Amino acid sequence: MKTPLLGGFGPPHDSEHWLGPIQRLPQPMRRFAEGETVDYAIVGVGAGGGVLAQRLSRAGFRVIGFDAGPFWDTERDWVSDEAGSHPLYWEDLRITGGTHPLALGQNNSGKGVGGSTVHWAAFTPRLHPSDFRIHTEDGVGVDWPISYDEIRPYYELMELEMPVSGPAWFPWGHPHGYAYGPHPMGGVGDILIRGCSKLGIHVSAGGPVGILEGSHGDRPHCIYRGFCIQGCKVGAKASTLITHVPDAIRSGAEIRANCMVSRIHLGGNRRVTGISYFDPDGKERFQKARAVIVAGYSIETPRLLLNSACPGFENGLANSSDCVGRYLMAQAGNVVLGRFDELVRMYKAPPAHCMTEAFYETDPKRGFARGFAIQSVAPLPISFAKQMMQAKGAWGWGLRRLGMDYNHWAAIAVLGELLPNAHNRVQLADLKDSFGLPVARVTFNLYDNDKKLIEFAKNKTQEVMWAAGATEVVQEARYAHLVGAARMGNDPATSVVDRYGRTHDIVNLFVCDGSVMPTQGSANPGLTVQALAARTADYLISQGDSIFCSDNRDMTPPPFRKDLAPPETWGKGAPRLK
Ligand SMILES: Cc1cc2nc3c(=O)[nH]c(=O)nc-3n(C[C@H](O)[C@H](O)[C@H](O)COP(=O)(O)OP(=O)(O)OC[C@H]3O[C@@H](n4cnc5c(N)ncnc54)[C@H](O)[C@@H]3O)c2cc1C
Ligand code: SF4
């Protein structure tokens, strides 16, 4: 129950949106009338779609963001309970297969306004400069069509917009510091530091993480209750639901929640004309738009493009390259758990607060290309129990005893770069969902370099755990963070979108989410997804109406629009950005 001080509960209705007591928007959300044409229909209001909706509406475009899931009220809908947080995930039916089938559902995408940033841990490292040129440097994967220097200003901007807390000096990749100070260490962070220090490995303490270490505007600081992955009820953790969507609404965007987009429509002149969607009552409707941007995550984005096949694009919309759905990537995410005689209490902090990137770059002595990070993670009891079932085969009374021993365990995890491969892909299955749409079939295989990397990374992470003084060490194999499946590139024969996210095949159709990443590095992808979205927005804004009426593809780099950041970004902390 809310206290009288904070006011009574009330459901969000047409004229107000409640994002907890701290985020109540005092103005009505704009509603576009049935039949009205908008400039941009954005499919998915998550990491990419949320930033994009905010930028485009702030620049004066008429924008609707569609999301298949609800518009969360952080106070009413989220609970400090691990099991109660399940509605946050995209749990709809999907088929998974391949030599190493990926666990889907809560292991990857979110459903609802804010997307996966609602339940992400909010680790926010940048990709390294080398990540943009792994084919040139290491002879594997593919180079990006952009360089680190092109995305760097957007990294800096997004780090201020969330904002990111972190150390004054982060030594890996392109070394940099964070404007907002680091978090204090939790039990797991202490152990990662202890293990790494014994082995002479440098560690970053207290971030980088998109969680407030001091109050910021109307958002309170973190209270170290450890429910970040369950949706941070207090609003200390950044998600586009609280960082960008409120400003999008203030700037005139409409967010249509509980609306599942089912098809993108193509008109006579190879231009998209709008989208069909199922409204909250299950009725199929059409929204006319001058351009469409797909930002539905690496499974739903290719699924929608494939489901939108039509004459001229029988193989899926914007799929002349046959790359839609291909080059799907997941990072190696093996979790290493260690038991300590002392109490660790790993739940008492954000899981994401301590990491090392000392093994990030290729080292020829290791016998494989690319590398990995080691990060603090802190599973809550249900996840811990599942990990113990997998890692130790624990069951029955043995599992119960381990559960009672939870406070003595620490968990750290590998985040390793697995390489893009055309056979790792999203396709359409024969099965249909409740809307009658074919569901996604996800195929994932490990290849030689991947297996060698996982073996080395897993062993090194266990070494760190032993060095920290664990009396028992076990590990669970898992994968994290899906990206790719609509990759960007200069060559229309081998990629789906260009360097700004515009599909090579259709001038007014864009993709703007993790799907566009050609490789994934060993950094958690959320910051990169949001930085790319801000850059795509700058491009669209600089092109103005030509996106809607010209067939020219002007590739001139857009001016950097720092002024489009949500107003509360500035004036807090000590931004380094000039
Ligand atoms: C447990 C967990 C922890 C994570 N921790 C981190 C972390 O610490 N750091 C990090 O960087 N990343 C982390 N991630 C990953 C990160 O959250 C995602 O990579 C990122 O949010 C992806 O952004 P996106 O825009 O591609 O998709 P999303 O943010 O998932 O947004 C997609 C949105 O599209 C909507 N949608 C999809 N299809 C349709 C449709 N047809 N119609 C309407 N709406 C649709 C969905 O409902 C969703 O809201 C974590 C993920 C998980 C599962
Ligand atoms: S630990 Fe901090 S960021 Fe995580 S849920 Fe609690 S208050 Fe939110």
Image (cartoon, rainbow, N blue to C red):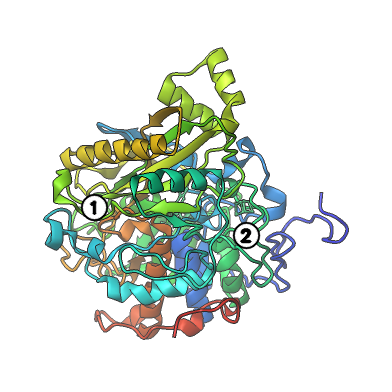
Which structural element holds mark 2? loop
Indicate whether 363 appears above or below 268.
above
Quadrant, the C terminus: bottom left
Q: Which mark is residue 236?
A: 2
Q: Is residue 393 visible?
A: yes
* 224 is higher (above) or lower (below) than 550: above
Q: Residue 386: x and y, percent?
A: 49, 28
Q: Is residue 369 above or below residue 532?
A: above
Q: Is residue 108 visible?
A: no
Tag 1 secondary structure = loop
Task: Give me the residue at 17% from left, 54% from top.
Answer: 141
Instruction: Tell me the distance, in whole angstroms, between the alpha carbons under discs 1 and 2.
Output: 46 Å
Relative placement, left or right, of 222 versus 393 is: right
The residue labelled by disc 1 is 314
Q: Is mark 2 within 8 Å of ligand 2?
A: yes
Looking at the rendered structure, the kind of residue marked 2 is Ala
Say whether disc 1 or disc 2 marks the residue closer to the N-terminus.
Answer: 2
Indicate the position of residue 488 as horizontal and vertical percent values. 25, 63
Q: Is residue 358 left or right of residue 474?
A: left
Residue 72 image point, x, y percent: 63, 54
- The residue at the point 46 percent across, 29 percent down is 387
Residue ID at (57%, 80%): 570
Q: Position of residue 181 (x, y in %)?
A: 54, 67
Q: Is residue 281 left or right of residue 307?
A: right
Query: Within the image, what quadrant is residue 402 found in?
Result: top right
User: In the image, what residue type sits under mark 1?
Assistant: Glu
Circle 2 Cα neighbour tier, 10 Å, few/some/many (<14 / 14–19 / ≥20): many
Q: Quadrant of residue 433?
A: top left
